[in-house]
Amino acid sequence: MARNAPSSTGDVLLYFMAIFLPPVSVFLKRGCAADFLINICLSILGWIPGVLHAFWIISKYGTPARPKTTVAPNGHMTQKY
């Protein structure tokens, strides 16, 4: 599966952080979601599973797209995703 854009500088820093603290890098990428809890469990089982999971999460999920803000004819701002 090819990605649309190469890794950003932020992703490179997350990869570096994933080597030392895998759950923190997953938390910064995905927030407090199921991926974060899975990574904590994998890190408890061993350092290597936690790092591999963190690398996978960082590479799988790109930077979220910013919504486009437009102004409607009535003057209200709307967001399109």
Image (cartoon, rainbow, N blue to C red):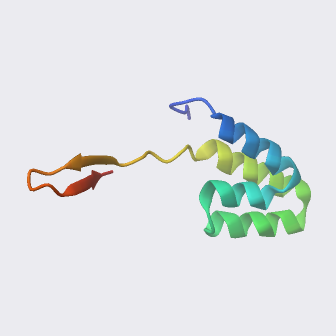
Marks counted in the figure total: 0
Say left or right for 54 vs 79.
right
Q: Nearer the viewer, residue 25 or 75?
A: 75
Say left or right for 72 vs 20.
left
Say left or right for 78 vs 33.
left
- Dividing the picture into quadrants, the one containing residue 8 is top right
Q: Nearer the viewer, residue 73 or 22?
A: 73
Residue 38: give x, y in percent of width and height.
72, 67
Residue 72: give x, y in percent of width and height.
14, 51
Say left or right for 33 vs 23.
left
Indicate whether 62 appears above or below 6: below
Q: Residue furthest front?
A: 75
Residue 4: give x, y in percent of width and height.
50, 31
Q: Nearer the viewer, residue 8 or 48?
A: 8
- Dividing the picture into quadrants, the one containing residue 2 is top right
User: Residue at the location (65% across, 63% down)?
Assistant: 35
Indicate whether 33 appears above or below 74: below
Q: Quadrant of the N terminus?
A: top right
User: Residue at the location (18% across, 58% down)?
Assistant: 76
User: Residue at the location (55% across, 33% down)?
Assistant: 3
User: Residue at the location (44% across, 45% down)?
Assistant: 65
Residue 15: give x, y in percent of width and height.
76, 43
